[in-house]
Amino acid sequence: AVVEAAREAVVEAARDAVVETAGKARASSWPRYDTLFEFFLQRLADNDNVEQMESRLARLLSDAPRVTDAAYECLKSKCEDSATVISGLNVFRSIILERPGRDRGKSLSIVMSYSIHPDVLIRGPSIRLLASELYESFRGSDLAEQIQNFSIKTARSTPTKEQASLECRIQLFLAVCAKNNDLLWELMEVYQSFDEEDKSIVLKHVEDLAKNLNRHSPSLLNIIRGTQPQVSIPASTSESSDIVLQLVKSLPLEGMQKGGDEEFVKAVLYRFEASKDSRFLLPVVGLFDRETVIRYLKNLVAVPESEGGFRAVLKKLLSSKHTDISPSDLLVELHLVDREMTGREVPRKVVFASTQACFEMKAVFNQDTVANSLHRLVEMNPLPLLLMRSVIESLVVHPKLRDFVLGLLRRLIEKEVWNTNHLWEGFLLCARKTLPRSTRVLLTLPPEPLRDALSKSAPLRQALQKIIAQPRISIPGWQSSIINESVQNG
């Protein structure tokens, strides 16, 4: 009733003002209307019931013949109070939707000014109104273009005293980018114009942007590839890689499907091939088939520890429903990375760390899995250089494999393991760790390798010396001679 009475009163006053205007100067024709309008405006604005206040103000300001400056000041006071900011913005929304022309433009300008407000309780709702409601609902219109241009301008602007932080200037633009992915190229250019401190702020907020992006968007896929005819942003530059990587990492990848996300995976791999940055592989590794895992394994082991290292790769691979490589195959292929790559490309310690990560996952790389992998590795020619490290580690993780390992040592003797220094040293270390049971394996060594083994290891000399000291044990004379000689030479 109050709203209706106010509406009728201001309409009548407006009608009188229009009649008076016909014969008088326009500037003096509205005083009665303004006084009455502002009286009712203040009564409605003072309502302690926020919901009633909002709905009644919205109706009055939508229907009134003219909105005075006092009305805008009243609404601004509501928007600058955290208790009533939502209501104030909703009334501005009604004006924008219901009153085209001057009032729409003025209301839009006020709301846009709040989108860069230092107080996030004011800035946040303003951004949501502009991007999620107005921009999205009026795509292609002058209103949407105004919002878009304002967001770009403020993102590029120099900070003022009132908006000292980049966070005040960039968030509306990022929200608009989420609705219009074509603007992502603009984001790339804006990002590269910032200093390092501002870039770190943008990267933090890009996480929120990515959560609202569609990974099938053509614009996003082009951004990931780094291919856009109108804009030249090389994929290999660290500046562009940082923000694109943050986008890829932060995208909502739940529910990704092997076939349905093929273009997304291709785009990421294209970017990787251009940048050689292994961090790009981690988000999509769970969609790789066996052949793709093997193809990129030398790069996956190089995922930096800052991203979780190879443990993060393992977690994604082994939890994926799409990757068809078995734990046993994976452990074998890791040893082949070391065999096929030069130290300059993949340091051996990096590959070793990746196999170590496998052994730490005892539930997955269980006793049977490890035994299967080691058996296959021992039969390879040439033998992988990290083989003996893994054999020794298997004893630590799965002590019950001791008898199995002794069998591997016998097989390695058959394959003349002493011809490769690195493997021979590992063989001798493994033999020491499996004493005294490994003595019988050592006694199958030919003369020269036996002599070399005993000269390099006091524990092995002592163990074999005890063997020949036992009267019930008979060994060939040449073995006794080598053992005694090595003991004497100490």
Image (tube, grey):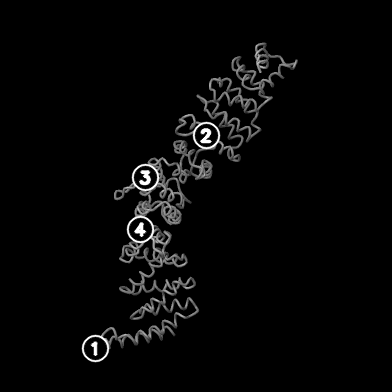
Where does residue 199 sit, x and y in percent of width and height? Answer: 42, 53
Residue holding disc 3: 235
Mark 3 falls on what kind of element?
A: loop
Q: Mark 4 or mark 2, which has the lower sequence index? A: 4
Report, in whole angstroms, how far the alpha carbon at label 1 lies from the one at label 4: 50 Å
Q: Disc 1 residue type?
A: Gly
Position of 132 relative to 450 (above/below): below
Residue 320 in sight from this viewpoint: no
Mark 2 falls on what kind of element?
A: helix
Q: Are marks 2 and 1 in contact (CB under 8 Å)?
A: no
Residue holding disc 1: 23
- Closer to the camera in the image, 363 or 61: 61
Q: Are marks 2 and 3 in contact (CB under 8 Å)?
A: no
Report, in whole angstroms, how far the alpha carbon at label 4 lies from the one at label 2: 45 Å
Residue 272 in sight from this viewpoint: yes
Position of 429 relative to 252 (above/below): above
Q: Mark 4, mark 2: which one is toward the viewer?
A: 4
- Closer to the camera in the image, 23 or 5: 23
Q: Quadrant of residue 369?
A: top right
Residue holding disc 4: 156
Q: Mark 2 or mark 1, which has the lower sequence index? A: 1
